[in-house]
Amino acid sequence: MQTLGALEAGGTKMVMAIFSDDGTMQDRVSIPTMEPETTMPEMIRYFASNHVSAVGIGCFGPLDLNPDSSSYGYITMTPKLPWRMYPLLPTFQKELQVPIALDTDVNGAALAEARLGAARGLSSCVYVTVGTGIGGGVIINGKPVHGLMHPELGHQLIAPCPDDPSPDGFCPYHKGCLEGLASGPAIQKRWGISAKELPHDHIGWQMEADYLAKMCVSAMMSFSPEKIILGGGVMQQSFLIPLVRRKTLNYLGGYISSPVIDNGLEDYIVPPALGVNSGITGAYLLARQALDSQSHPD
Ligand code: ADP
Ligand code: ZN
């Protein structure tokens, strides 16, 4: 029986899992993300000792996903300096000598939600995580979108709210992009209190919902997804999704008519059905793909 390795590579932790052929998770471990010299050998040991036949990796971005590029499979301009321009995919390939597929963590999560979760049965969806950063994955025709690089929904420019006391935003690259205005740390910097502790009736939540609604409208107008899935730590505030739906409807201004978005968007903007497992499940699906494309090359 074959075993498949899955890696959800994050800036603070690396989550690794072993899946059996039928998709059952057999083992799962988490190690802190240190510099590559420490963390890579640990991960390689884990997968090698479990004799994996393939590995799927969902990784924080940005990544070079262009197979024709000389830095294909590298982590590129990340602010996590020890990992900047790190050859993640080439290093794993050299050490493990098995088929390996790499995509962004959020494209992986979007793939998992499309195949097995909230967007099951649909051929398109957008998955956005609102946490330490904001990232978005996009599935169109059943496949993650790549193109020039890969979608970076968190770094789209967003018009600040007129009453935002920090309208310039906090992104080191763009200041007032979505991540710079609406990530967990942006909420904390703006209000001086963590998102976890910000009271439910605080104006900050109206602002947060406003920014996320603008993102939902942009995603709908850009990609025409059949479902938008909002996950990540900040979305643990369960009153937030209904607020986002309401504001999204307002911003749409009646322009889009589809039975799918009736119902006050209740079935359209939804939490992840796979909960915190979207990412690692996506990595498993990537491993499957890597294995299948080896046995059935295009
Ligand atoms: P990461 O993005 O690092 O993978 P998370 O998705 O948990 O991890 O995001 C962490 C961010 O989410 C922090 O900024 C934190 O303040 C915020 N956060 C975590 N839990 C909650 C919560 N229950 N309510 C609101 N914000 C939260
Ligand atoms: Zn940005």
Image (spheres, rainbow, N blue to C red):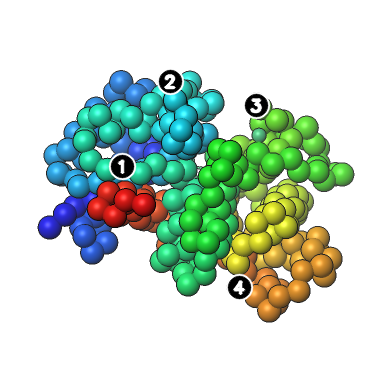
Whole-angstrom CA distance, mark 3 to mark 2, is 17 Å
Which label's residue is closer to the chain start, 4 or 1?
1
Give left or right: position of 18 versus 76: left
The structure residue drawn at horizontal position 70% and vertical position 65%, both measured from the top left corner, is 245
Which label's residue is closer to the chain start, 2 or 1?
2
Which kind of residue does numbered mark 4 sit on? Asp
Q: Quadrant of residue 42?
A: top left
Label 3 environment density (alpha carbons within 10 Å; few <14, some 14–19, many ≥20):
few
Which label's residue is closer to the chain start, 4 or 3?
3
Instruction: Give me the disc on residue 267.
Output: 4
Query: In which quadrant will I find the N terminus?
Result: bottom left
CB atoms at circles 1 and 3 under 8 Å apart? no
Which kind of residue does numbered mark 2 sit on? Pro
Instruction: Give me the disc on residue 172.
Output: 3
Instruction: Give me the disc on residue 87.
Output: none
Residue 88 x, y percent position in the rendering: 37, 30
Which label's residue is closer to the chain start, 1 or 3?
1
Label 4 environment density (alpha carbons within 10 Å; few <14, some 14–19, many ≥20):
some
Instruction: Give me the disc on residue 100.
Output: 1
Callout 4: SS = loop
Give left or right: position of 57 versus 109: left
CB atoms at circles 4 and 2 under 8 Å apart? no
Ligand 2 lies under 8 Å from the Cβ of mark 3: yes
Callout 3: SS = loop
Q: Is residue 187 visible?
A: no
Whole-angstrom CA distance, mark 2 to mark 1, is 22 Å
Which kind of residue does numbered mark 3 sit on? Pro
Whole-angstrom CA distance, mark 4 to mark 1, is 35 Å
Callout 1: SS = strand
The structure residue drawn at horizontal position 27% and vertical position 61%, both measured from the top left corner, is 23
Residue 41 x, y percent position in the rendering: 24, 27
Which kind of residue does numbered mark 1 sit on? Ile
